[in-house]
Image (cartoon, helix red, strand yellow):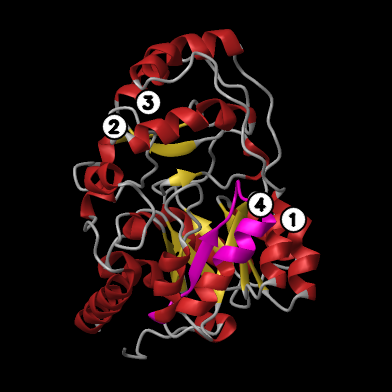
Amino acid sequence: MSGGLQTPVCDLLGIRVPILLAGMANGPSTPRLAAAVSGAGGLGVLGVSGMTCADVEREIALVRELAPGAPFGVNAQLASPTPATGERARILEVMLPFRRELGLPDEPPEPAAADSAVALIECALAGGAAVVTTFDDPSPVAEATRAAGARLLPMVTTVDEARRAVEVGADAVIAQGSEAGGHRGTYGGGAARGGGTMALVPQIADAVGPGTPVLASGGIMDGRGIAAALALGAQGVSLGTRFLGSAESGAVEVWAETLRETPADRTVVTDLVTGRPARWIRNRFVDALLEADPGTLGWGAQTRLVADLRRAAAEQGRADLLPMLAGEGAALSVTREPAGEIVAQLVRETEAVLAKRG
């Protein structure tokens, strides 16, 4: 692989190309995917939210086995619970027809046990994670990350958040534009803030200065997007949706196939699915929530309320009922392409664009 795409962030993270895998927990993130990206010269990142420390230890062991010697990262959602904006009975009333359609009981079961986000990150650091990427305020894990000799890369959605991240010791920041799939990294879990990637990246790069690398995230699916991010002042990219349909991704088949059929106007940012703003593919389930607008039980409780519905829809291949995260660039996806080949292709495309533009 050509070294022409190397930037200073590559030296910081010990990687060959400045392409990071976003931490896509609760399904898409797998050890095989993280290992494939790291093995191809980028940085594979495991999304571990909702796991136990024993789970994390097993997954890290597999990453190290599949990509020996290659650095890898870990991501967990540090966000605290948020207040409810709706009544449980009303929310379940809206979901009830879909639960019954999937053969689920009217009442969701108790959630499976999981360790705290801080504990999961500490377990990952003990297992050899070289990088920690964070969701929400990184302060709770900053000291542990430094003590382990790892790099801290918080996700930020505004200039103010970027400055706060640097103050607590961020080695670099991931600027998440509004086009991004997944949950908004907004500190405090309030309404989604921040602008699109094209507007956000140069503002954050100017604000944090040349000593703090910026990685762009949101709507970037090919070499054209990477080249644009570099031109705006980024030193690399963090990609989720581009790898969501890869061969090693844990996203179920209907999710991977739906990506290519999803133009930007068929995604929407809403907190109605999990209690925190995230960009979802619009389908029967999401549209029903949008139309009824029953509010949520808040971040944490709302996620547990939909967990079994999400599992059942995935198992039954129900694209119309499965809550599916995706960015605005989803239609540019390629289904079940090996992640290592995706990294290589992105490098070739970016170098071609940069060469063409001089």
Give the alpha-carbon distance from disc 3 to disc 4, as whole Å.
Answer: 29 Å
The earlier-in-sequence mark between 1 and 2 is 1
Residue visible at 28% across and 28% down in the picture: 320
Q: Is residue 42 magenta?
A: yes
Q: Secondary structure at mark 2?
A: loop
Q: Quadrant of residue 142?
A: bottom right
Q: Which mark is residue 340?
A: none
Q: Which residues are magenta?
A: 40-59
Q: Are marks 3 and 4 in contact (CB under 8 Å)?
A: no
Give the alpha-carbon distance from disc 1 to disc 2, as whole Å.
Answer: 34 Å
Are there few (<14), some (14-19), or many (20+) residues within 10 Å of tag 3?
many
Residue visible at 51% across and 57% down in the picture: 23
Residue visible at 44% across and 58% down in the picture: 217
Report how many numbered discs are placed on residues in the image: 4
The earlier-in-sequence mark between 4 and 1 is 4
Judging by the rendered image, the residue that carries numbered circle 1 is 119
The earlier-in-sequence mark between 4 and 2 is 4
Q: Position of residue 181 (x, y in %)?
A: 41, 47
Q: Position of residue 166 (x, y in %)?
A: 70, 65
Judging by the rendered image, the residue that carries numbered circle 3 is 286
The earlier-in-sequence mark between 2 and 3 is 3
Q: Going by the image, does 227 lie left or right of 193?
A: left
Q: Secondary structure at mark 4?
A: loop
Identify residue type, mark 1.
Ala
Q: Are marks 4 and 2 in contact (CB under 8 Å)?
A: no
Give the label, 4 or 1, closer to the camera.
4
Comparing 103 with 283, the one in front is: 103
Judging by the rendered image, the residue that carries numbered circle 2 is 318
Q: Secondary structure at mark 3?
A: helix
